[in-house]
Image: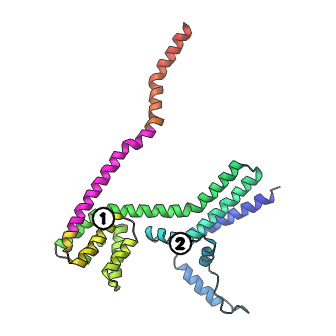
Amino acid sequence: MIPPLVLVAALSVGAALGMLVWLMLGARDPERGPALQNLQSQLALPSPGAGNAPPISPARFVKVLSPPGTMTRLERLHVLAGRPAMWAPERAAMMKLVLAAGVGLLALVGVSSSPSVGRILFAVAAVTLAYFVPELLLHSRGQERQAAIELALADTLDQMTIAVEAGLGFESAMQRAAKNGKGPLADEFIRTLQDIQMGQSRRLAYLDLAARTKAPNLRRFLRAVIQADEYGVAIADVLRTQASEMRLKRRQSAEEKAMKVPVKVLFPLMTCILPTIFIVILGPAVINMMDVLGGM
């Protein structure tokens, strides 16, 4: 006979996993949502006494259940990650709630079978970790994207410098670099050019580009471009100086990472490699000494 608490927890976890799979797979077909909403609006019948009350959407439900500041933080992480469709803020918030609820029910079953302080602390830690897992994944994706922008910035500035010195304007050089390049930096340049073509001023477009990224070198370059545009400095000189500085910073970053390698290797060397070497070298000598001392 299955205990009722275990049965309820299993059903709840199954529903939570189904909801999680639906959330993850629902973003693959972006046209399905509006079409389904239009079909539902056509087939819906007016209910008596409904009035003009707005429908309760899942997004509003998620915002009500989420703690204050969660949606703002998720929106910021979503922007830094490049606005992936699968990790929309509402979807990520729903994943947080579903995972926390599923792990919480499992923890409740484990604690109720044999309650103890250790199990209670472990259950609280597991629920907390499950709640922040989607946010951590989104943060990790954003960090990878910012690192890719930093890595591609020096080469992109070299291409823009060559194009400007050949006679192209700054926006034309940016468009050529974005067309020839790949990755998040090229995507951001294309979006910035689209903002300028839509009528946004250059300053605001560059400031929006800096706000969408956390790459300090890119922000420094954009500040230099904005100042050059305001004070009438030749953009070719700015690009040449910034490209040289970016190459120097990338070389210094590589040297810094190389200097950190011995320190990072020290711990696995002391814990894994040296004990094995000591056993292989000193093991036979210790066995011989034990045999000799035992014979005496």
- Label 2 sits on what residue type? Pro
Residue 172 in view, yes or no: no
Separation (CA) of disc 1 from disc 2: 28 Å
Is 259 on the left or on the right of 112, as rendered?
left
**Residue position for label 2:** 89
Q: Nearer the viewer, residue 1 or 71?
A: 71
Q: Residue furthest left?
A: 166
| 79 versus 6 height, above or below | below
Q: Are marks 1 and 2 in contact (CB under 8 Å)?
A: no
Q: Nearer the viewer, residue 276 or 135?
A: 135
Give the image's coloring scheme: rainbow
User: Residue 260 location in percent, x, y?
Assistant: 36, 46
Residue 97 in view, yes or no: yes
Q: Judging from the image, what secondary structure is the residue with disc 2 in?
A: helix
Q: Nearer the viewer, residue 39 or 81?
A: 81
Question: Where is residue 70, by image quadrant?
Answer: bottom right
Q: Is residue 248 magenta?
A: yes
User: Residue 283 location in percent, x, y?
Assistant: 49, 22
Q: Judging from the image, what secondary structure is the residue with disc 1 in?
A: helix
**Magenta-tinted stretch:** 239-268
**Residue position for label 1:** 153
Is 226 on the left or on the right of 261, as rendered?
left
- What residue is shown at x 72% (from left), y 60% (from top)? 10
Most common secondary structure along the magenta stretch: helix
| 18 versus 284 height, above or below | below
